[in-house]
Amino acid sequence: MANNTLIADEVSFMSEAAPIPLRVTTPTVRQPAVARNVTELSERAKKVAAIDVDFFYGTHQALHGISLEVPENCVTALIGPSGCGKSTFLRCLNRMNDMIDETALKGQILLDGIDIYQRGTDVVELRKRVGMVFQKSNPFPKSIYENVAYGPRVAGIKKRAVLDEIVEKCLQQSALWDEVENRLDDSALQLSGGQQQRLCIARALATNPDVLLMDEPASALDPKSTAAIEDLIFELKSNYTIVIVTHNMQQAARVSDQTAFFYEGHLVEVGSTTDMFTNPGEKKTEDYITGRFG
Amino acid sequence: MPQIAATEVLIASRGRCNLRTVFEGILHAVLLACAVVSIITTVGIVLVLLLESLQFFRDVSVWEFLTGTKWSPLLKPQHFGILPLFCGTFLVAAGSSVIAIPIGLGTAIFLSEYAPPVVRDIVKPLLEVLAGIPSVVFGYLAVVFVSPIIKELFPSAEVFNAASACIVVGFMILPTIVSLSEDVLRSVPRSLREAAYALGATKLDVTVGVVVPAAMSGIMASFLLAIARAVGETMAVTLAAGATPKLTLSFFESIQTMTAYIVQVSQGDTPAGTLEYRTIFAVGLTLFIFTLSLNVVAQWILNRVREKYE
Amino acid sequence: MKLHAHSKSRPYAKFASTCFAVMCGFCTVLSVLVLLVVLWNIFSYGWSALSWNFVTSWPSRFPAKSGIWSALIGSLYLIGVTAVVSVPVGVGAAIYLEEYAPPSRWRTLVQVNIANLAGVPSIVYGILGLGLFVRMMHLNRSVIAGGLTLSLVVLPIIILSAQESLRAVPSTIRQASYALGATRWQTIWHQLLPVALPGILTGVILSLSRALGEAAPLVVVGAATFVAFTPENLMTDEFSALPIQIFNWTEQPQKDFHQLAAAGIIVLLVVLISMNALAIILRQRFGKKVKW
């Protein structure tokens, strides 16, 4: 783990939210993916695990027998050509696919060892523990403050002081605080594209999730904002388990610890990012990575 | 570790009767009840009409009702043939359509194909205002303004006549035709028009030969809806067309429509439970079936039009 | 060369096209002209009868002493009852259909039913009111009976326009809200309703203005045309309404009553046009604000 950050002790202890260490000093130098190795990945606890997952849109089968483990506090990238099912799989992890009619899932998806698709699962609670950032930023037509405070509010937090703290922490974590601290009551829609996406990240962090799902978070942004988002992901992973869908392979190589390659609804190969990009096992993976198709 | 305990909360809530679930459940039920009110309304209309009409048809045969040519339930001797009322309604519907359809379609075509956006922005709100004017106002206009003019132009016309009712009802249903037809005309794809122009057609050719035929089913639906409105129109015809049910094709005589009859009986002191009272429901049932059929067909056509362009 | 021959055979094509355009323009002018003539006619005839006295007097057999006070108050009570009943039920039904009901035969049935109800003549609602509220529920010829009947008349319109407003809210808002662990009601209350509110309000105002002008259902339910008092008890007292009074005056043969009718129409139109203008302003100001 990168050690160039100074981590301050918990500044305050909120009864309704677990303590989040504050980043006090300025940015780190990112360690390249090459330095991480396979054994580290396997030593970590498995935060999310998919076991033999089939997914159907009506009669059309979109996912075939996906088995994938997501290690804790790492970034797992899902790559593959468009239409291969990576976004569908991502949306299974927080059961957002439930909102689409006539979908069905077979198999299991475990969060900390418990199947989230079993009967009686409280989906509302699940979505507080597994947060999501969408491809196109979608801030609410409210103020910046209200956007971030929405998650804690619907979770039941009412005290203004507590909400203030949460908003500040999350905006700092998503590296947006410096730019907006004086205009928290301005409409979120006035922010630039990159700022809006960082706001959406802050909003997702406000419910104190364990897992953060990101569906091509930087695909609609310019290169500078993209770099900012990637820096952010690198910072966040020390505290969150992140699963990111991306069609940009260089991004996957830069940012992730583990990469999973999807093709036509099948999981072709999964492994540490280093191995996948330097020495892929399957021919298809190699073809995709070297750009022979995609 | 706190993580695992929190996860168990996910599952433990199964079977736990927490406040939030109860609240959401109650809310769902309340909102469902609101939606059910609309079903109850329809059921209510059908039941009320049917129950009293069935009583009515114990005393008057359906055959006599549907084919009799005299309608005088409030006078002795009593006759219960609905054809005169049908005829009156038909005259008003036909007459108002003759006015509303050409003018309405012409306006719709102009707004959709010829008018610059400025003109549309002025005319459309004005037509909305026209649509919002209550029918009593049109009834008043018919009595005070239109009937005298008709009497001047056609001295043999009676004070109450179908023509003045037709004129005002025609302009009442005009906005319906214009707004619906204009929507359908505008939704015809540009590519169709461009293809026609590219072949050297004039604007008339394109409009009448390509655009209007393409939008025809939607336009027909708007006509049906307008006619349904004319059939159901009450206050204007009550004031203008008169209260004499008769079988005639003359526009210059006093007649009575189904709706005007219902008003006439309601204004009087007909005691509940009598045969005369039940005529309200029998005529109402006929009216309901008629307008419902027109509306159902129109909606069906409109749905098909929507599917076509989506 | 062949093409030249063709165009020569239609020498009047362009002229016909222009004629057609002119005809259509004429139709449009006629439509607008009618409205202006209507308004001018009414205002010029009724203006002189309009006075404060007119607004505050009871109707009487003598045109000079007649006023619309009881009708005005009756209309206000009616609209009040209609609003209180139809708005919650209508908006509730719209929320149910858009946010809760899964697409199914049941939902299609309800939708089709509402669309059909919107086309039922208002006098049929009056008959329903007569049979159900006045007789079966023994509410007699009261404001409540009239108000409930009018509520049923405007209910389909409120539901349809509220549904459209809710549909116009982008689905990305819903997705973001659910992804944060909000319940369905929290999403509706905090995110959807605030955004859809201007559209819903517009629909409500337009529906209520329609209810204000309705006379046919009230005639059947038993509104009186000669009340010299305002209803005290909403459940039992007889009542009148603006359009009913206008109707009654127009029915009289004397010209003086016609003039009173015109004055009454002016009052009615002023209220209606203000309500419609309010709805249009709402739609313009807030409808365009939400641009994604």
Image: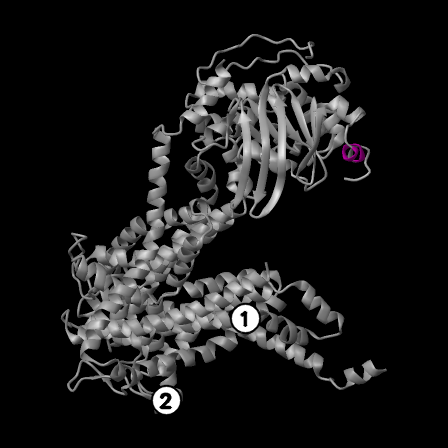
Residue visible at 66% across and 39% down in the picture: A265
Q: Is residue B234 left or right of residue C161?
A: left
Please state, as top left, top right, bottom left or bottom right, where the N terminus of chain C lies in the image.
bottom right
Residue visible at 36% across and 66% down in the picture: C120
View extreme (bottom): residue:
B156
**What stretch of residues is rendered in magenta?**
A283-287
Q: Name the image quarter holding residue B203.
A: bottom right
Q: Nearer the viewer, mark 2 or mark 1?
A: 1
Where residue A61 appears, x then y in whole percent?
Answer: 61, 44
Indicate the amino acid at tag 2.
Answer: Ser
Say above or below: C186 vs B191: above
Where residue A235 appears, x then y in whole percent?
Answer: 65, 18
Q: Chain of mark 2?
A: B
C50 drawn magenta? no
Residue visible at 51% across and 75% down in the picture: B103
Q: Are marks 2 and 1 in contact (CB under 8 Å)?
A: no
Residue B250 is tagged as 2
Q: Name the image quarter holding residue A283.
A: top right
Where residue C275 appears, x then y in whole percent?
Answer: 39, 54
Measure how far apart labels 2 and 1 are at the Cα level.
32 Å
Indicate the amino acid at tag 1.
Answer: Ser
Q: Is residue C88 visible?
A: no
Numbered disc 2: secondary structure: loop
Return the residue nearer the eye: B279 or B62: B62
Say above or below: A184 vs C268: above
